[in-house]
C-alpha cells in the first residue's frame, strides 16, 4: 500500500469509528498535526507510528496489505531519493568510449558518495529500531531512539531518547503498548531507572491505562508533578495505578519534553496490595489547600 492509499485508509477507518482527528491523535499519544499530515499523505510515517494508529482503530494488520517495513521516515525517504539519483547518473556514465579517465574519476567519486549514503541510511535505521518499542509524541521527528551498550543500569544495555533539534516545542516518547488482560481489576506498580543529561524542560516515566470500549484513558501518570530536570544519575522511578476491569491496553514509556537526552533501563511491573500501596498521585497530592499566601 502506497502513502496516498494509506492516508485514505486511516481516514476511512477513523470516520467509521466516529472519531475526530484530535480524538485519534490523543488516543495514539500523537500530535493533531501528525494525524492530519498522514491522512493527507504529506509525510511518510514510521512503521511503528502506523502500527499504533491502526491498533487504536481496531484494524487487523495480520490480514492487511500494509507492509510496515516499506514505510520510511522522512529522512530515509530523502536519502533513498538522493541515492536513486546517483545510480541514475552512474548508468549514464557506463559508456566509456570517450573521456575514459574523466569518467572513471567521476565514477570513483560517485561510488564514495553512494557508500557514505548507504552507511548513513543504515545507521539511521539502526538508531530508530528497538524491538517492541517505538518513537511517538507531539514532535517525534525532533527525537531519536536507540540502544546504548556503554551506559546502563543492568544487563549491559539501556535505551535512550534524545532530541535532534536545537529547540523543541513539544515532546517525544519511547513507548510500548501491550494487552491489559493479565492485570484486570488489580493495582500495579511500574518501576524503572532514568538517567538524564542537559534536560531543558523536563522528563519522566509514564503509564496510561486505556479502556477496551472507548479507547480513552481510565488511569494515567506521567510524573509531571515530580519531573526529572537537568543532569541526573540513575534515578529510581515508580508509578502505581489501578487497572479497571474495562481496561484494554497498557501504554508506557519515558518522555522527554524539550531538548536533552534520557536513558531508560531495568523496567519491571508487579501487582501490589491496594490497601498497602496508595496510587502514586494520591501520595503526591496535598491533603488540603496549602501556602495560599505564598509565605
Image: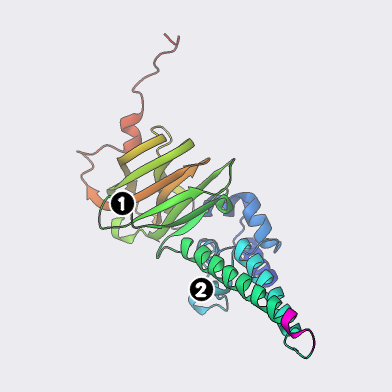
Is there a contact, CB below 8 Å, between mark 2 and mark 1?
A: no
Residue 226, located in which quarter of the rendered image?
A: top left
Up-down: is 121 above or below 97?
A: above
Give the residue displayed 36% in from the left and 28% down from the top: 285
Residue that carries the numbered disc 2 in the rendered image: 61
Q: CA distance from mark 2 to mark 1?
A: 34 Å
Q: Position of residue 123 (x, y in %)?
A: 50, 65
Quadrant occupied by the N terminus? bottom right
Prevailing secondary structure of the magenta residues: helix
Residue that carries the numbered disc 1 in the rendered image: 152
Q: Can residue 135 be spotted in the picture?
A: yes
Q: Is residue 75 left or right of residue 269?
A: right
Give the residue displayed 69% in from the left and 81% down from the top: 104
In depth, the one of 249 and 141 nearer the eye is 141
Q: Which mark is residue 196?
A: none
Q: Secondary structure at mark 2?
A: helix
Give the residue displayed 41% in from the left and 48% down from the top: 254
Q: Position of residue 65 (x, y in %)?
A: 57, 79
Which residues fall within the magenta stretch?
98-102
Amino acid at each position: 500500500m502506497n502513502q496516498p492509499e494509506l492516508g485514505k485508509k486511516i481516514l476511512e477507518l477513523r470516520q467509521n469509528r466516529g472519531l475526530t482527528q484530535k480524538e485519534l491523535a490523543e488516543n495514539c499519544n500523537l500530535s493533531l498535526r501528525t494525524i492530519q499530515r498522514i491522512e493527507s499523505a504529506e509525510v511518510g510515517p514510521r512503521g511503528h507510528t502506523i502500527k499504533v494508529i491502526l491498533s487504536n482503530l481496531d484494524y487487523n494488520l495480520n490480514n492487511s496489505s500494509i507492509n510496515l517495513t516499506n514505510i520510511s521516515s522522512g529522512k530515509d525517504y530523502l536519502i533513498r531519493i538522493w541515492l536513486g539519483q546517483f545510480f541514475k547518473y552512474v548508468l549514464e556514465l557506463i559508456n566509456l568510449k570517450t573521456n575514459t579517465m574523466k569518467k572513471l574519476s567521476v565514477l570513483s567519486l560517485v561510488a564514495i558518495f553512494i557508500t557514505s549514503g548507504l552507511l548513513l541510511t543504515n545507521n539511521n535505521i539502526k538508531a530508530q529500531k528497538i524491538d517492541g518499542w517505538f518513537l511517538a509524541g507531539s514532535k517525534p521527528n525532533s527525537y531519536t531512539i536507540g540502544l546504548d551498550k556503554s551506559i546502563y543500569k543492568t544487563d549491559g544495555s539501556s535505551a535512550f531518547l534524545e532530541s535532534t533539534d536545537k529547540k523543541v516545542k513539544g515532546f517525544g516518547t519511547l513507548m510500548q503498548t501491550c494487552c491489559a488482560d493479565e492485570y484486570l481489576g488489580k493495582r500495579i506498580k511500574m518501576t524503572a531507572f532514568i538517567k538524564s543529561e542537559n534536560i531543558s524542560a523536563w522528563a519522566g516515566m509514564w503509564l496510561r491505562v486505556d479502556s477496551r470500549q472507548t479507547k480513552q484513558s481510565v488511569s494515567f501518570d506521567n510524573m509531571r508533578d515530580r519531573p526529572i530536570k537537568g543532569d541526573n544519575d540513575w534515578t529510581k522511578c515508580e508509578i502505581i495505578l489501578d487497572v479497571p476491569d474495562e481496561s484494554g491496553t497498557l501504554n508506557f514509556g519515558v518522555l522527554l519534553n524539550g531538548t536533552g537526552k534520557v536513558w531508560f533501563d531495568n523496567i519491571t511491573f508487579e501487582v501490589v496490595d491496594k490497601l498497602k500501596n496508595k496510587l502514586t498521585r494520591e501520595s503526591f497530592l496535598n491533603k488540603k489547600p496549602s501556602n495560599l499566601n505564598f509565605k
